[in-house]
Amino acid sequence: MKKDIHPDYHMITVKMTDGTEYQTRSTWGSEGDVMTLEIDPTAHPAWTGGTGRMLDTGGQVAKFNKRFGGLTLKR
């Protein structure tokens, strides 16, 4: 393997929005830096699978169904 091509991994502290902190290895910042999160991955719907619903009233899905809704597979 080539030398000096890999990023420098070092210990940083990650501070969650609720104030809890943990140590991890990262290439972000430098040794001992604190990364403060603005969005908490333990509570945000993007990471927890949230209860999001797809609302499409007259949008792309409706247009697709109007155009191709009558098609069936023939054998």
Image (cartoon, rainbow, N blue to C red):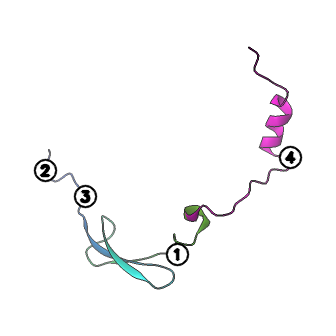
In the rendered view, does 69 fall on the left or right side of 32?
A: right
Labels 3 and 4: the sequence-earlier one: 3
Placement of the N terminus among the 4 image quadrants: top left
Q: Amino acid at mark 4?
A: Gly
Residue 46: within the magenta? no
In terms of depth relative to the viewer, which is nearer, 49 or 61?
A: 49
Q: Which label sits in the foreground, 2 or 4? A: 4
Q: Measuring from the top left, give residue 73's x and y in whole percent.
A: 75, 21
Residue at the disc numbered 4: 58
- Disc 3 packing (10 Å; few <14; some 14–19; many ≥20): few
Residue at the disc numbered 2: 3
Labels 2 and 4: the sequence-earlier one: 2
Q: For numbered disc 1, what is the local secondary structure?
A: loop
In the rendered view, does 12 fall on the left or right side of 42?
A: left
Residue at mark 2 to residue at mark 3: CA–CA distance: 11 Å
Q: Amino acid at mark 1?
A: Glu
Cβ–Cβ under 8 Å for marks 2 and 3? no
Residue at the disc numbered 1: 38
Labels 1 and 4: the sequence-earlier one: 1
Labels 2 and 1: the sequence-earlier one: 2
Numbered tag placed on residue 7 in the rendering: 3
Farthest-out residue, front: 75
- Disc 1 packing (10 Å; few <14; some 14–19; many ≥20): few
Farthest-out residue, bottom: 19
Residue at mark 2 to residue at mark 1: CA–CA distance: 36 Å
- Give the quadrant of residue 52: bottom right
Cβ–Cβ under 8 Å for marks 2 and 1? no
Residue at mark 3 to residue at mark 4: CA–CA distance: 48 Å
Labels 3 and 1: the sequence-earlier one: 3
- Disc 4 packing (10 Å; few <14; some 14–19; many ≥20): few
